[in-house]
Image (cartoon, helix red, strand yellow):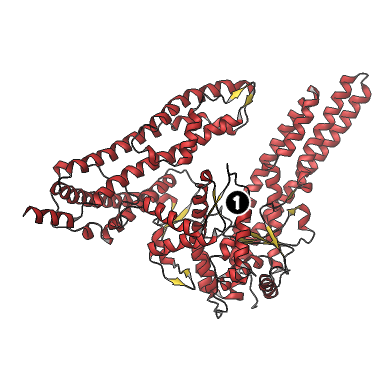
Amino acid sequence: MNQVTVSKDFKQKATKAILSVILFVISYIILIAMAVALTVACAYAGFYIIVSGRHGITFMLGIGVISLGLLVLFFLLKFVVSSSKANRDDLIEITREEEPKIFALIEDIVEQTGTQFPKHVYLTPDVNAAVFYNSGFWSMFLPVRKNLMIGIGLMNTTTVDEFKGILAHEFGHFSQRSMKVGSYVHNVNRIIHNMLFENNGYSNAISRWASISGFFAIFVAIGVKVVTGIQWVLKQVYHVLNINYLALSREMEFHADEVAANVTGSQALVTSLLRGGLSDSAYNSVLNFYGEKIRDNRMPVNIYPQQHIVMERVIHNLQLPVKHGLPHVTISDIKKLNKSKLEFDDQWSSHPSDADRIARLNSLNIIKPDTDNANALTLFTDKEVTQQMVTEKLFSKVYYSGNTTTHTEEHFRNEYNEDVERYSFNKKYNGFYDELNLGIVALESLAGEEHVTEEELFCESTISNVNECIGLESDIAVLNQIAAGGTMVKTYDYDGNRYKAKDTKTLLETLNIKLTDYRNSITANETKIFGYYYHLAVKQGKQEEYKNKYEAYLKTMQDSDVLAKTLEPLHDATAFLNTSNEADTIPAKMQRLYNCEKPFKEAVRQMAEKPFYEHVNINSKDAFEKYLSQEWVYFEYDMFNEAALTVFFNSLNHFSAALSNMQFAAKKDFLDFQASLSPATVAKTDSAVV
């Protein structure tokens, strides 16, 4: 492999990260010194109280004083015995004997990147690949063997060359000594994170100690105040360290990409990055589909052909070219799907954007000949057995209420396509209504649009106006937050131009004018659409049906708005459930929750009586039925009823989705009827009259 140089940006980010670590070390030494001094002082004071006293009270008091110093010191040292261990319950380990081709490929990558062979190789079901290891304080000083995790969903949607590039990227993080700094910064970052946010074990320990005696509880309370002060100091350091660590992490990703590009060439990584979002979306679509089948006790033997079926549908809808049996996605395809023109330098992200990674890879322009464009699953000794084994592992934790029946690839294809059709609008609309609600018009006042065609009403320029409008609305909402000072954003790009936060109000004035123009254009076109179809309905004697369906849609939207408002008070009323509360404040907070819940529960009852409720997801209906089955008590005998709260929150979570289902059903009912008013039907009717 060609020697990969460490970039100037990487060196700068690494220097800042190291300086942040030094800041932490200095701060930590000072805190430790103060904690040791406190511990020694408490020890002397405690022993003095014990030996000078003549009864049990002074003994307990002395022990409490001693424990104060120890509690603070232990808080600062607990990370030494802490470690981060990956949960391997869902992983399937493979060996060289079982999968020689996989291990031969890894051996080749290890040799080219100059890294160690992984200690273990595991399979996972998802669209992912990662190198991981158990990290802790001592891993900064002791060598730790890495493990490799390979997602079957990833292999199912990549070629062998692309898969090799992805693995080379993972090993690229450890390919040079210069990358060791990233490991140190990561571990120091974890140390502070541990002291700030991973305190369940510590809290439980001091709570148990405090419960032994009232004397101990007093000094635990004092210790907690001291620890809170220490955490305030550490938060300031963590803010600086974390930003610099994340900046270094983004540079490490670029470095790992360059390592991988030297193994397989730039394009293998570029094509896999561009396809990655589609692969992951298809995989999750399959999982969501089978989530709906749990109630029917239906499970798949192999979900990975289904992943391809979903991708085939996307290929058809987006008219993507196919290369090596997989969709060939380009940057322009991604931009079509992304309606926003806003771009930020995300200082809180550990990874650069795919667009930035692709741009960097293209600038490297490392060309390597294709060696293997077969699907990466062909590396397995028996890919069918492997896919089925991983699928079985994935669904082994799913609870089915009865005996399961097998759901085949053909079952999936038929039912998935039916679902897509059920949740799609007629193709003649060309996507015009996909994200656009129907406008409000007085149908009888519309002039007939007899000199236009459906092709003109739903032409590409019209669809472009809708997409521009949707993108503008979203961007303006974000820019309004920036203008109000509600974000930490200092600079950003809009439509390829750089802006400062202080210039946002001026930009908003221009964008709001554009938005008004787009909305006016869309409204004018919608008026033509309504006029065109309403007069078709009149000619066919279907104007009353047309009006009724349109009014049913408007009524559903109005009803949904009213029902949705019952959720708003509950957001505030339930917020206390996510925080610690003094015991004597809980009854009043619970009473407020019960008061806010009454309108919501009535809204759930009313929803079931609405015309389009039959289109609500069956899981949502089950959740509502259980919620309405009794009056749930969420707090009694000084304890929260977790089972009742689960029923309540499950109903809350399903409520908005159920309203969306009903709105969509009403909209589709009207649009399907409208699409059936074909001009050809009118021609036949007119001919019959003649």
What amino acid is labelled 1 in the image? Phe
Q: 175 or 602: which is nearer to us?
A: 602
With 608 as the anchor, is 8 left or right in this view? right
Q: Is residue 672 depicted above or below 589 in this figure?
A: below
In-image side of 39 versus 554 (left or right)? right
Measured as percent of width and height from the top left, residue 479 is found at 41, 48
Question: What residue did someone put label 1 on?
Answer: 395
Is residue 529 visible in the rendered image? The answer is yes
Q: Secondary structure at mark 1?
A: helix
How far across and down, in percent of the image, does residue 9 sit? 59, 65
Q: Residue at x 80, y 43 (%)?
A: 33
Q: Position of residue 134 (x, y in %)?
A: 73, 55
Residue 226, x across and y down, in percent: 73, 34
- Quadrant location of the C terminus? bottom left
User: Which one is in front, 358 or 281?
Assistant: 281
Q: Outermost residue, bottom direction? A: 369
All told, the count of numbered labels is 1
* Quadrant of the drawing holding the N terminus: bottom right
Direction left: furthest residue: 690
**Relative side of 95 to 439, left or right:** right
Query: Above or below — where is 244 with respect to 484?
Result: below
Determine which quarter of the picture holds residue 635. top right
Q: Quadrant of residue 664?
A: top left
Q: Residue at x 37, y 50 (%)?
A: 422
Q: Is residue 499 visible?
A: no
- Binning the other alpha carbons within 10 Å of mark 1 as few (below 14), some (14 to 19) or many (20 upward) gives some
Q: Is residue 273 left or right of residue 51?
A: left
